[in-house]
Amino acid sequence: MPPPLVLIVDDNPENLSVVGELLQPSHAVRVANGGFRALAMARLSPQPDLMLLDVMMPGMDGFEVLRALRGDPLTADIPVILLTALDSAEDEERGLVLGAVDFITKPVRPSVLLARVALQLAQRAAVRQWRADQFHLQAELQRHQADLLAAQDTALRVVLGDRKSVV
């Protein structure tokens, strides 16, 4: 199984490098240096399992990227952790309301970042497994319903067939 893919989005190359090096031992990493590039990379196959998104970027800020991700069915369920120098409660609330799963302020503490990334990736894996289980159970239910209908049809033919021979 391939390692989880994390898309890191930041307009600062040093931040991309530091976070990327921190994650690379156990994660596949893609980087984007702006919002428009991030949206394009989020749609690439394979899609990222998690996005680490800077808020303050020129052109398209992280809040706009997050809004666009959530508005696109193809990218709506990619978990996003906002990484930002913004530290006000209003900024954190705004990010969470827009659909971020977490909010980490810079400078990033490596142990905190790794723990939160691991938590979100574990949750994503659990959701994917749950969905796969639901799909499997739905298929089983449909198979059992088809078997039941076939048995019901057979029983009706036998009963109706017996009546014809009696009359």
Image (cartoon, grey):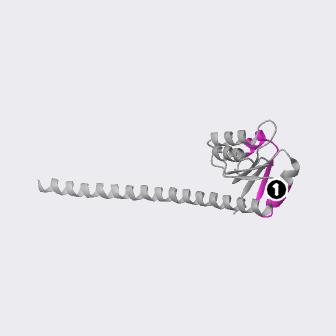
User: Which element is circle 1 on?
Assistant: helix
Q: Position of residue 108 (x, y in %)?
A: 80, 56
Crowding near pointer 1: few (<14 within 10 Å), some, many (20+)?
A: many
State which region is magenta.
Answer: 18-41
- Residue found at x 70% / y 62%: 118
Furthest-left residue in this view: 167
Residue 43 visible? The answer is no
Furthest-right residue in this view: 14
Q: Position of residue 166 (x, y in %)?
A: 12, 56
Amino acid type shown at disc 1: Val
- Residue found at x 80% / y 61%: 110
**Is residue 66 positioned above or below 105 on the image?**
above
Residue 16 or residue 39, whichever sits in front = 16
Classify residue 144 as left or right of residue 158.
Answer: right
Classify residue 6 as left or right of residue 77.
Answer: right
| Residue identified by numbered label 1 | 19
Q: Position of residue 159 (x, y in %)?
A: 21, 57
- Residue found at x 85% / y 51%: 15
Snapshot quadrant of residue 55: top right
Residue 11 or residue 103, whichever sits in front = 103
Query: Is-magenta flag for residue 21?
Result: yes
Query: Is-magenta flag for residue 100?
Result: no
Classify residue 88 as left or right of residue 96.
Answer: right
